[in-house]
Image (cartoon, rainbow, N blue to C red):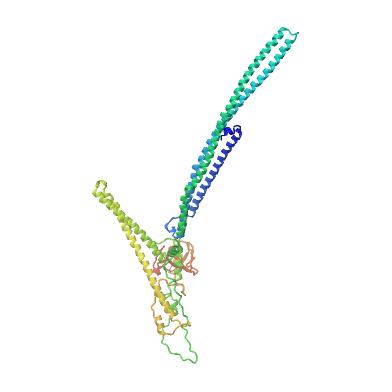
Amino acid sequence: MSWGTELWDQFDNLEKHTQWGLDFLDKYAKFVKERLEIEQNYAKQLRNLVKKFCPKRSSKEEEPRFTSCIAFYNILNELNDYAGQREVVAEEIGHRVYAEIMKYSYELKAERKSHLQEGRRAQQYLEMCMKQMDSSKKKFERECREAEKAQQTYERLDNDANATKSDVEKAKQQLNLRTHMADESKNEYAAQLQNYNAEQHKHFYIVIPQVYKHLQEMDERRTVKLSECYKGFADAERKVIPIISKCLEGMVQAAKSVDERRDSQIVVDCFKSGFEPPGDYPFEDYSQHIYRTVSDGTISTPKPEVTRIDPKITMGKAKGKLWLFGKKPKWSLRMVSKVCWSVSHPAHGPALEDFSHLPPEQRRKKLQQRIDELNRELQKEIDQKEALNKMKDVYEKSPQMGDPSSLQPKIAETMSNIEKLRTEIQKNEAWLSEVEGKVSQRSERRHSAEANHLVAQGRESPEGSYTEDANQEGRIQTQPPVHTEFDDEFDDDDPLPAIGHCKAIYPFDGNNEGTLAMKEGEVMYIIEEDKGDGWTRARRQNGEEGYVPTSYIDVTLEKNSKGAVTYI
C-alpha cells in the first residue's frame, strides 16, 4: 500500500490531509498546554491551602498538642507532598510531551512544505513539456495546411495553359519550401511528443510516487509521535502513583492516630488549676439571741449554760472566723475569678519568672518544663566540658596538634555556664518544692473540711432541727479558729478602708465574676494588697469593688498602712 501508486492523481487531497494532520497535532499540543496549566494551578492552590491552614509557630506555646490537631497538620503535610507530586506531573508533561510536540510540529511543517514544493515543481515541469508539445503540434498542423495550399496552387497553374512558365516555377518553389517546413515541424512535433511522453511517465511513476512516499512517511511518523505522547502522558501520571499512594496512606495513618482519651487528658493537664472544689456554704443562725418560750402546761428542764456565739463573729473580717458547722469553705469568688482569668489569659500581661501569676497546677507544670530544659542544657555543657578536657589531654600529649592553653578560655566559659545552670535549676526546684508543698497542704485542708462537713451534718435531726446535746455543741463552739489562705471577704457588712491608690497601666475587661473592669489610666482605691497570687482588690469612687491583675496597675500604698511602697 503506497500513496504514490494508489493516489497518483490526488495531489490536492493529500495536501489537504497533511495540513489536517499538522492542525490536529497543534490541537493536541494546545490540549497538553492547558492540562499542564491546570496541573500547575492545582498544585499552587493546594500549597496555598496548606499554607493558609498550617499553624504559625512563632513560639512553643502555640504548638499543637491535641491528637486531632496533630493529625490534621500531618494530613496537611501529606497534602503538601501530594501537591509536589502534581507539580512533578506538570513538569513531566511539559518536558516529555508539550516541548517535544511543539518541536516536532515545527519540523513536520518544514518537511511538508519541502515535499509539496517538490511535487509542484514536477507538475510545473510536466505542464511545460505539454505546452511545448502542443506548440510543436500546432506548428506542424499549420505548416501542413500551408504546404497543402501551395500544392493546390502549383497544380492549378501547371494545368492552366495561360499560365507562364515563371509562375509555374515560382509555385513549384513555394511548394517545395512549404513541404520542407512541414517536414521540419513534423520532426519537431514528434520529438516534443516523445519527450513529453517520457517526462509524463517519469512524473507519474518516479517523481510523484517519491514525493507521495515522503508525505506518507511524514504522516505516519506524526501518527506514531502522537501515540508516544499519549503514552508519555499516561506514564507521567503512573510514575507518581506510588508516592501519591504513600501520601494517602499517611493521611489514613494520621486519621487513625486520633485518640479522644488522650485529647481529654491534655485538656485536664492544660487547664487544671490545682485548687479544690468549693465546699458547702455554712448555715448562719441569726436566731441565737431569741429565747425559746415554754408552752403552757409544760415544764422546762434547766440546761447547762452554753457559750453563745456573737453573730458579729460570723460576719466579721478576722481570718480566724468561727463558723457554726466547722470552718468556712476554702473556695471563694475571688479565687474562682482568678483561676478562670489566669487559665483563659495565659499570655496576658508580663509573665513572672517564677510563674506565680498562674494557678498552682499550671505553675508546677511550667516549672517542671523549665527544669527539664535546664537539665538538658546542663548535660550539653557537661558533655562539651568533657570533650574539651579530652582535647586538652591530647594537645598536652601531642603538642604538634595544638596549644593546650588555647582551650582554657573555652573551658572556663563552659564551667561558668555550668554553675549558672545549676544555680538556675536549684532556684526553680525550690519554687517547684514550694508549689508542691502548697498543693499537699490544700489536699490536707480539703480532707479536714470534709470531716467537719460530716460532723456538721450529724448534728442535724431528720426533721431539720438541731440537737440539744450540750457536749457536742460545746465541742463545736470551742473548736480553735482555722486560718485559711483563700477566705472570701465579699460578705463584709462594712466597706474596707482604703490603704492606697493605683493607676491602670493596661486595660482589663473584667468579664469573670469577682473581677473589676478598668480602663487604661483609671485611678482607683486599694483596699487589699496582693497576697502573692497576682491579684489586688480595688474600689472605684462609686463604691464598686473587685479584683484586678497586679501586673496591670501601678500601686502606691499609704505611709500609715505599710510605708511608702510603689511597684509595678
Q: Position of residue 482 (x, y in %)?
A: 39, 75
Asked if residue 475 can be seen in this view, the reply is: yes
* Residue 270: quadrant of the picture: bottom left
Q: Is residue 411 left or right of residue 106?
A: left
Considering depth in this image, is 549 or 385 the residue closer to the camera? Answer: 385
Q: Is residue 115 left or right of residue 362?
A: right
Q: Position of residue 82 (x, y in %)?
A: 48, 51
* Residue 119: quadrant of the picture: top right
Considering depth in this image, is 50 or 6 the residue closer to the camera? Answer: 6
Considering depth in this image, is 127 or 85 the residue closer to the camera? Answer: 127
Q: Residue at x 71, y 12 (%)?
A: 154
Q: Position of residue 451 (x, y in %)?
A: 40, 76
Q: Is residue 552 left or right of residue 23?
A: left
> Which residue extends farthest left?
397
Quadrant location of the C terminus in the rendered image: bottom left
Considering depth in this image, is 34 or 127 the residue closer to the camera? Answer: 127
Q: Position of residue 337 (x, y in %)?
A: 46, 67
> Which residue extends farthest bottom?
297
Query: In the figure, 470 relative to 122: above or below?
Result: below
Circle count: 0
Quadrant location of the N terminus in the rendered image: top right
Q: Residue at x 67, y 20 (%)?
A: 141
Query: In the figure, 481 relative to 403: above or below?
Result: below
Q: Residue at x 43, y 59 (%)?
A: 61
> Which residue extends farthest right?
162
* Residue 339: quadrant of the picture: bottom left
Query: In the figure, 191 relative to 558: above or below?
Result: above
